[in-house]
Image: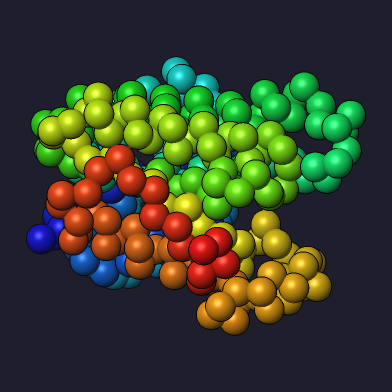
Amino acid sequence: MLNNKTALITGGGTGIGKAIALLLAKSGVNIALNFSRSEEDALQTCQEVKNLGVRCLTYKADVSKDAEVKAMVSQVTADFETLDILVNNAGMTHFVEHSDLEGMKDEYWDDIFGVNVKGMFFCCRAASSELRKSRGCIVNITSIAGLTGLGSSIAYSASKAAATSVTKSLARVLAPEVRVNAVAPGIVQTRWVEGKEDHIAHLAAGTPLGRIARPEDIAEVVYSIINHAGFVTGQTIVVDGGNFI
């Protein structure tokens, strides 16, 4: 069903993005991998994707910059001649304790919203015409932080709440040709949490399933939305092992 389709995955070189790329590639999806800084990781992931027998190309772009996003989507469309799937996985944060109100600097708000909200919107907007042609779909990777108000910083939580709202708005605007949904992970075993073993153990102990998520857990849900949920749009699927019930 997905064979020979093309997916653009932002922040696709590592973590959740990488897991999504590999799982889609196993179903015959050609992959356009976006990165902003982690070029070496993106090239390594690209080779792993190619080893699965599909096409893969990498694209450097800062998703918070609209001109770079438009240029990237245009090049992806030229290279692959179609765009069927957009996964907005790129994200960033600044770690600031919620109680440290003065520590939540203006520039941190701008950085976080620039990638997590504006960047997501820029990618959706740039890809919308091609996705309409292919009757494709969008999956935005948000976070339970946007639902709980917890997370790495107040600005990060707010950005993910905003991303959930944008998902709903775009689901209405781009229907019926394009489905738009979000996946909201809890804490995931990625480089974002490296060195925070005590924090991870504490969170895992409070989760009904007894562990935190692996990137592959998130990828499986993204794949299901893309391939098996043709009548689902405007929804946010929480993937956190039951921690937020």
Front position in the image: 209 or 63 = 209
Residue 16 shows in this picture: no
Residue 79 lies left or right of residue 99; in this view the side is left
Residue 37: horizontal and vertical position, in percent?
60, 42
Residue 104 shows in this picture: yes
Front position in the image: 85 or 242 = 242
Residue 32 lies left or right of residue 62; in this view the side is left
User: In this rendering, is residue 22 above or below 83?
Assistant: below
Residue 19: horizontal and vertical position, in percent?
43, 64
Figure quadrant of the N terminus: bottom left
| In the image, farthest residue toward the front | 245
User: In this rendering, is residue 12 above or below 94?
Assistant: below
| In the image, farthest residue toward the top | 67
Residue 82 lies left or right of residue 44; in this view the side is left
Front position in the image: 78 or 132 = 132
User: Residue at left 25%, top 29%?
Assistant: 172
Front position in the image: 36 or 50 = 36
Report the coloring of the rendering: rainbow
Residue 233: horizontal and vertical position, in percent?
25, 43
Q: How many marks?
A: 0
User: In this rendering, is residue 98 above or below 218?
Assistant: above
Residue 58: horizontal and vertical position, in percent?
41, 45
User: Residue at left 35%, top 63%?
Assistant: 221
User: Residue at left 55%, top 39%?
Assistant: 160
User: Residue at left 55%, top 46%?
Assistant: 147
